[in-house]
Image: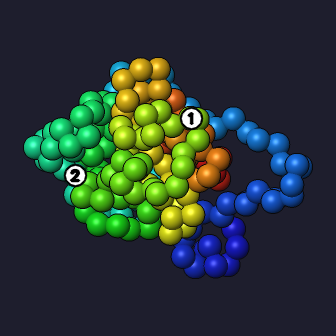
Amino acid sequence: MGWLARLFGRERRDRPAFKAGRRKREAPPVAPPEATDDPDWAWRTLVAWWDRTRSDIPIAGASDEAIEALERRYDIILPPDFRAYLANAVPSCDDIDCEIGTWWPLGRIRNIPEEYPHPVGGAVRDQGRRTLFFLDYSFWCCAWAICCEPGDDWGKVLLISGGDQIVADSFSDFVAAYTSDPWLML
């Protein structure tokens, strides 16, 4: 551990080398099997990671009425793990974690057309009308969104950055990967 990391009590992480064509893409970790039956696994894991990394994200949680209003606004049904995150751990304001990720409060969560004026790739269904942003990276270099469109992609998390792609099969899988190494999600 370096002296600065010891000073601030932060974990040291080696950053991947940015050499074109030389970096082997690792498969991101996925949530453990018990997360499938426990919609609270994702938000508890995320809050524990925020605490462990001293990210100081102010947690508010949203009321059932506010979550239902979000579902009505976009005519969606939220995946259970993402709904549990909103109810228990959504931040009260925009705040940055230790990896420069800004987790959005409920009032800022929007669909792709409202937030992102650029064309989206083939991984995004229905032009993103039922896909909600919940986290951006490095002051909106890119952002992650969850698909709430009924069908095969429901609940999957996408990276929106020009080369739009599905990065996780569920919010729980996204949290498992992001909390182990956010660079795997970029």
Q: Secondary structure at mark 2?
A: loop
Label 2 to label 1, Cα distance in Å?
30 Å
- Tell me the mark number nearer the camera, choosing from 2 and 1: 1
Q: Earlier in the sequence, mark 2 or mark 1?
A: 2
- Comparing 107 with 84, the one in front is 107
10 Å crowding of disc 1: few (<14), some (14-19), many (20+): some
The reply, left or right, for residue 100 in relation to residue 88 is: right
Question: Residue visible at 52% across and 41% down?
Answer: 158
Q: Residue at x 54, y 76 (%)?
A: 8
Residue tagged 2: 61
Q: Is residue 161 left or right of residue 139?
A: right
The correct choice, above or below, for 178 with respect to 166 in the image is: below
Residue 123 drawn at (x, y percent):
56, 35
Q: Nearer the viewer, residue 161 or 3?
A: 161
Q: Are marks 2 and 1 in contact (CB under 8 Å)?
A: no
Q: Nearer the viewer, residue 126 or 97?
A: 126
Q: Is residue 42 visible?
A: no
Query: How far across and down, in percent of the image, does residue 24 sit?
Result: 82, 43
Picture mark count: 2
- Rendering coords of residue 27 (x, y %): 69, 35
Q: Amino acid at mark 2?
A: Gly
Q: Is residue 179 above or below residue 127?
A: below
Residue occupying the far left of the picture: 65
Circle 1 — which element? loop
Q: Amino acid at mark 1?
A: Ala
* Colour scheme employed for the rendering of this structure: rainbow
| Residue identifier under label 1 | 123
Q: Nearer the viewer, residue 80 or 114?
A: 114
Question: Hey, which quadrant is residue 72 in on the image?
Answer: top left
- Residue 130, image quadrant: top left
**What is the x, y in percent for residue 115?**
40, 57
